[in-house]
Image: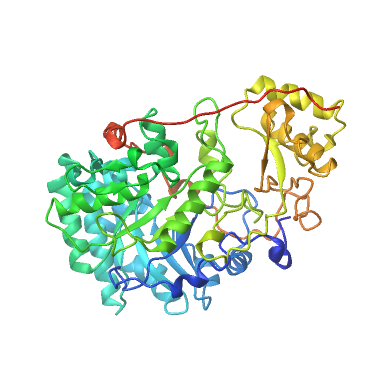
Amino acid sequence: MGISISSYSSIPPLFLLLFHLLSQYTLPCLSAQNESSFIGVTIGTSVSNLLSPTDLVSFFKAQQITRVRLYDADSSLLSALANTGIKVLVGVPNNELIALGSSTTTASAWVTRHIVPYIPSTEISGIAVGDEVPNSLPSALPILLPALQSLHNAVLSNNLSIPVSTPLPFSLVQDPFPPSQSFFNNSLTQSFIIPLLGFLSNTSSPLMVNLYPYYAFMQSKGVVPLDNALFKPLPPSLEMVDTNTLLHYTNVYDAMIDAVHFSMKNLNFTGIPVLVTETGWPSYGDHSVEPYATKDNADTYNSNLVKHILEHTGTPSHPEFTSSVYVYELFNEDLRPGPISEANWGLFFGNGTPVYLLHVSGTGGFLANDTTNQTFCVASDEADIKSVQAALDWACGPGRANCSEIQPGESCYNPNDVRSHASYAFNSYYQMQGRGSGSCYFQGAGVVTTTDPSHGSCVFPGSKLQGNISNSSSNTNQTASNNGSSTFKMRKGEKNYSKHVLSLILSIMMSFSLATSNFWS
């Protein structure tokens, strides 16, 4: 069974006070709803042991999450969100587009069934029609705009004011750097992009875009610096400079946002706000093909993203406007097929335990991660697997670490791989040694982190979750709808962040030094 609601208070709230303080940071009224920029989270349901709708809403409240994006219009969750003050972006799955775009009656019935019954108790902030349709379901593209128009008209006929838009893949933007030269895919400009922008402008709706600096970095083959993708400071000599505008870009995210703005401007559309409906970083993946899908990088990206949005500095070309963003995603979707990383984008596991802890205290000293004195020892992602295996053998042998929980059938056996098992063994030894200096070295295979590596029912020694989480993996209270989960999304691996991103930066600067020493005895 998942953790009880009464134990939520024991989870370090990743978004604690983050959303609460948004009211203290204001922007000019440039968003589609004349509101300040916000940070929300996406909610997928390809999750085993997902919390029930009631428990899920209690979880939102405990984490002070006030904005969520759903990929469908789940009636149970929409009902549970009533009178909570949590604003929800409701989704229309791709497999419903043809029916909605072909019949105004069907579109009207959809609004009558999925929107009207929940207003005003449930605060519906928008309708996201489809997801990355040009890439994920191109056959439905001719029907997408009619679906948007029909749903918008149905909303108006019910005397409601709810923006209607569609999340687009960033790959529609060609030559994204320098941003001033970027443009939308020419093959779709006349038939789709211009009519869409006209609709959004006329209805005061945002342009929704899913964008991922992670993929810009991965597909650049070393041209984009990792630090630039993670919002880390760069020396001025390595900052990206748009030679046409002389604007300096210190991170990939801002460059991508401005590329969207300039692409619209090049079609004579200005004033349409950009809403980032997905962005994030995977915390785990196949090390042979996605070596940068790590907890530390995911923590760094999302923590710095939060700080960046809360600073309300906008982008170089639009410092007056900070785009709102939904972090992808709240839960690891462990049932999602595809590459390993596809199941590891979440901030939490399905039962509410954190995958890692965000570090955003620098935005005002408010997020109480409470990890200053809480450290763990885990296997380094940079160490070669043979070194990790040797250190694991030592820890469970001469080191006398408690390795019982990584045996077959025990709570920390899965994931059944060397790094995961080594992390548990290293941490067991590290905590047993009182977290003493040098006790997390393991000949360079270990690294100290403030991120709690506990996951699911596997609780690492030293975790504050000890004693609060049931080891049972079942959740008998699960009532959230998982039906049709395949309609929620096409996966990130299918995104095509064009080769033109290679021009984002001149070089990558990374260094790594591996110390050598003897094991302790």
Give residue 214's position: percent from left, percent from top: 43, 40
Please give left or right for residue 3 compared with residue 37 in the image: right
Please give left or right for residue 91 compared with residue 202 in the image: right
Give residue 27's position: percent from left, percent from top: 34, 71
Vertical order, 116 against 457 (above or below): below
- Is residue 474 in view from this perspective? yes
Please give left or right for residue 264 compared with residue 316 in the image: left
- Is residue 71 in view from this perspective? no
Point 31% across, 45% down: residue: 170
Give residue 2's position: percent from left, percent from top: 71, 56
User: In front here: 493 or 136?
Assistant: 493
Q: Quadrant of residue 398?
A: top right
Point 26% across, 56% down: residue: 101
Give residue 176's position: percent from left, percent from top: 25, 41
User: In front here: 224 or 233?
Assistant: 233
Report the number of numbered marks: 0
Vertical order, 254 against 153 (above or below): above
Quadrant of the drawing holding the N terminus: bottom right
Point 41% across, 62% down: residue: 311
Q: How is the image coloured?
A: rainbow
Identity of the residue furthest to the front in this view: 236
Quadrant of the drawing holding the C terminus: top right
Please give left or right for residue 231 compared with residue 1 in the image: left
Identity of the residue furthest to the top in this view: 386
Point 55% across, 53% down: residue: 482
Q: Quadrant of residue 312?
A: bottom left
